[in-house]
Image: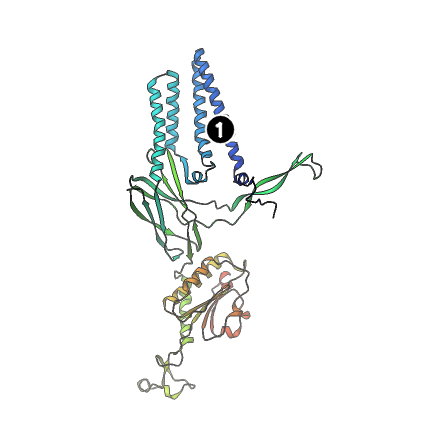
Amino acid sequence: MPASLESASSPNFAWASRLRRPGISEVWARFLLAILGLGLAFAAAIFSTVSREAGHVWATLILASLALLLAAAVGLGTVPYLARRVATARLREALDYEVTRAGVIYVLAIVVIAVAALNTGNNLLYIIVAAMLAAILVSGLASAFSLRGLQLDVQLPEHIFAGQTLRGRIALRNARRWGPSFSISVVPILRDSSGKRWEWTPATFAFPPGRAPGKHWLMLPDRKLHRVQQAPAPPGIFRGAAYFPYLPSRCQLGTEMALKFDQRGRYQQEGFGLATRFPFAFLTKTRRVALRREVLVYPSVEQTHEFREILPLITGEVENFMRGRGFDLYRIREYMPEDSARHIDWKATAKSGSPKVREFSREDERKLRIVFDNPRPGEISPEAYERAIVLAASLAWHFAGKNTPLSFLAPSFAFAGDGNRGQGIYDFLSYLATIEPGTSPAVLETVPVTNDYNLILTNRERESIPASLLSCSHVFFLSEESSGSSPALSP
């Protein structure tokens, strides 16, 4: 077993697991600062009493104010921070607190009135201070009750395309038998996207530090806490908040939120928060809800200017390749020497004065195969690569909407189809949603030469494509697109 791992049966396992939490040194620093601040506040309070008995009014005022300010600073800056890191994980992870501007002003008002009460000895001022402190307690209890018993559900669309505005639904239910909830906001919990995390690794404590190995007076095994790089978190799904001003008991309310993703890819929401400032807005109390949602955003399938330019060429070639012998009339055209005389249309010939023949559609309808030959990193620019992704998705979506039998081929992806029109289109779009330039070998050598017609998107040179594949394919060269010239389209 590696030295950095401990057995769960070890007596020090629980203590070590606590020490591995990130920021443990900061927790101890805050705790010591809180003890120091409270000690100074207590000393200032004692000296203010002595100064009052000695008749020094200004010294009494300054020392009493200093004691209250130190106590308030510890209460606002250290106590909430330490309360979120108590040993009970349920309490630590359930609620988050944030002091609002109104809360800060309210606490300062309490400090001013308390100083006046200490200096004057007026009982009415003491009663006012007590009432104001009681209001903070009532606010905390009311907000906690308002957040209790709430159930959250988030519904997202099944298929999402980049650049399109869709609607997601947020439903909030009050499962309590009695007691409504007031002023509830549903907010997304955003993860740290820096791509770093804390990790403990074995190290050695040596004294004196800085000496060469073997020349230390004391060497002890120790652990070292440092930050390591990890994969960045996927971007979030929601932005903003959904607000519910009033939610009765045993009632469910819902609202819709606009969703728009500018880029393809995977989006993930790790959780949501139910936040409230009810009733006095001293604190923003947030209850975290472990509700994970993940969506896959397909590439855009909007018909761009480039797509509209090449579509007539592709459509004409596909129709020309798929026509053939059959029973359904395809068109009437001029007679050619290689045509059979039994296909001559005598009525059209008599009307025009020149031989005309009938051309029929094929009985065995051919499939259209879309081949995406993924280029390697650095071969084309990121902008050209994204345009190629959008073009492949647009072509697939267009012909799927025309009920064309489709099959798809790409590195690590193949869908041959089973004769059902439009089958597998979402699998191919899901593949294009997360694909990146890869080092896998090209797929052109694996394209079977069949009766299917191929639409190929590749970065390879024309000379490297097999001639048997060019005869039944329409090729879009990505390298010529990325160079700024007109894209090369060749049958």
Residue 491 visible, this orientation: no
Q: Is residue 197 above or below residue 162?
A: above
**Which residue matches tag 1?**
34
Q: Position of residue 83 (x, y in %)?
A: 45, 34
Examine the image and state in which quarter residue 135 appears. Answer: top left
Task: Please tell me whether mark 1 sits on a helix, a strand or a loop.
Answer: helix
Please say whether residue 148 is visible from this viewpoint: yes
Q: Position of residue 5 (x, y in %)?
A: 58, 45
Q: Amino acid at mark 1?
A: Ala
What residue is rendered at 35% in x and 54% in y? 166
Residue at the far bottom in the pictured view: 341
**Residue plotted at (43% across, 23% down):** 68
Q: Nearer the viewer, residue 124 or 321?
A: 124
Task: List the single residue furthest toward the top.
Answer: 54
**Residue at point 39%, 16% (across, down):** 119
- 185 over 367 or under it: above or below: above
Q: Position of residue 198 (x, y in %)?
A: 54, 43
Counting every numbered tag in the picture gives: 1
